Amino acid sequence: LTLPDVLLLDEPTTGVDPKASRLIWDILSKIRESDTALVLTSHSMEECEALCTQIAIMTNGEFRCLGSTQHIKSKYGSGYSLAIRLSTSSQIEPTKELITKIFPDARLMDEHILHLNYELAMQKGQTWSMLFEKVAKFAETVGAVDYSISQTTLDQIFRDFSRNARSDVVKVHF
């Protein structure tokens, strides 16, 4: 038996435990290294990032975007995610007030016990180092136990496309 030119897979790891998923990913990665093209559908953006060189996001049966992971994050990402962990509940309100002063476009996405998660808009001309410096000063000021900043994830972009189901469909030609 030989490998086909194209292998179509529909949700290859849905319902599979994490260990088996990783095994399947390893096998598919080896297949991808051959001359076989893999085309897969998946709701798992983690799976798409691990296996795909090009990603298309569809909503309502229409392509919304097509490109590499980094291209999609850069073009459709809304900015950055900021996660903050505080040590006491008395820090929560002052932290929220200060974050809206430092990052006026910040959106509180999740609050759970002493954890706050924000979405920060991209600022024109702002570099990663400038952002890290700003966040480090902020975290020190509020006495954060821990904090992290990351680029918008594919999962967040996928959810935004799904939530908005916009009418500006991108025409994709193969």
Image: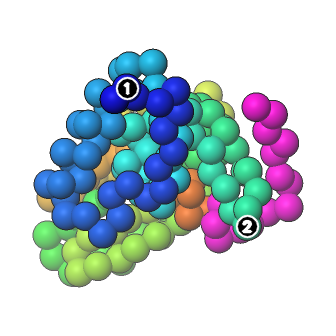
Q: Disc 2 marks which residue? A: 60
Residue 26, percent across and down?
Answer: 23, 37
Vertical order, 136 against 159 (above or below): above
Residue toward you, 1 or 132: 1
Quadrant location, the N terminus:
top left
For the residues marked 1 and 2, what is the alpha-carbon distance in whole angstroms?
A: 36 Å
Q: Earlier in the sequence, mark 1 or mark 2?
A: 1
At mark 1, the secondary structure is loop
| Amino acid type shown at disc 2 | Asn
Q: Is residue 168 left or right of residue 161?
A: right
Vertical order, 151 against 126 (above or below): below
Residue that extends furthest to the front in the rendered view of this protein: 1
Q: Disc 1 marks which residue? A: 2
Q: Which span is picked out in magenta?
A: 161-174
Residue toward you, 133 or 73: 73
139 part of magenta stretch: no
Name the residue at 23% across, 81% down.
113
